[in-house]
Image (cartoon, helix red, strand yellow):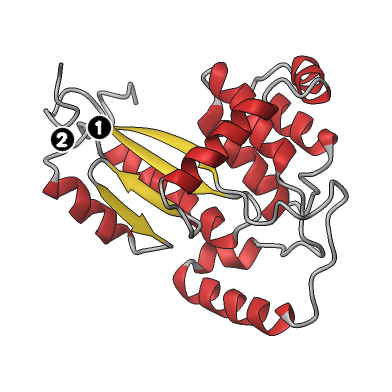
Amino acid sequence: MSDPNDGVNPLPVVVFADFICPYSYIALDQMDALVREYNIELLWRPHWLHPEVPREGAPIPAEAAERRAQTRSWLEEMAPERAARMRFPGKIPFSLFAFEALEFAQDRGLALPFKTAVFEALWMEGRDIGDFSTLLDAAERVGLDHTELHRALAEKRYRRRVYESLQLAREAGVTKTPTFVLGRYRIAGWHYYEVFQTVMEKQGVSRRPVLTDSAQGH
């Protein structure tokens, strides 16, 4: 069997996240950079923060207002460009349908662009990801068949798979979102990109070649 760290096979990198987590949202840029720079295979998996929330969402508790203000200040410092465009939802959104839609996208090789489209629908456009229409628009944006996705969501085709993934996250001891599993290493919570680079170097993960303008046809 080939060694996943042999410099040829991509290193598996798994991100356990919830679309409603602002820290998961600002990790998009870091993970996109990691994919561009290193030979990795990136997979986003669900870690459901609020399974108690109904489909229509739930009010944000009054005591959470101060914590939200602190989070916003932290984001403005750590990811100013993202933070400047972020729109915090006015309720706690329902995540399950988005997790199911991500499985649908995964089967069609479009999970990575789709998860970005869902994150941006929530955090940039202020849309409700508990609403099928938001997910269908995100699907259409990345080239997925929105009619087929609607049918899959209505028939709960991916419900069991999502629940199995959530159970695997619990068994793996994931308690914080986002949590990153990079080969042999696990990182809980948001960290500077240099931390991920260090983990890649420790495992001998090869860097992708940098394309010059001529190589790209410019």
Seen in the image, is 46 located left or right of residue 118?
left
Seen in the image, is 187 located left or right of residue 60?
left
Where does the image place residue 5, in percent across and percent down from the top left?
15, 32
Q: Which mark is residue 39?
A: 1
Between residue 71 and residue 18, name the one nearer to us: 18
Between residue 116 and residue 108, name the one nearer to us: 108
Q: Secondary structure at mark 2?
A: loop
- Quote the CA–CA distance across marks 1 and 2: 6 Å
- Can residue 96 be seen here? The reply is yes
Q: Which mark is residue 206?
A: 2
Query: What amino acid is found at the position of numbered circle 2 in the picture?
Result: Ser
Query: What amino acid is found at the position of numbered circle 1 in the picture?
Result: Asn
Q: Image quarter for residue 157?
A: top right
Residue with the most extreme right position? 56
Q: Secondary structure at mark 1?
A: loop
CB within 8 Å, label 1 to label 2: yes
Where does the image place residue 170, in percent across and percent down from the top left?
49, 47
- Can residue 124 be seen here? The reply is no
- Crowd around label 2: few <14 · some 14–19 · many ≥20 (10 Å): some
Q: Image quarter for residue 96?
A: top right
Image quarter hosting the C terminus: top left
Residue drawn at point x = 66 percent, y = 76 percent? 68
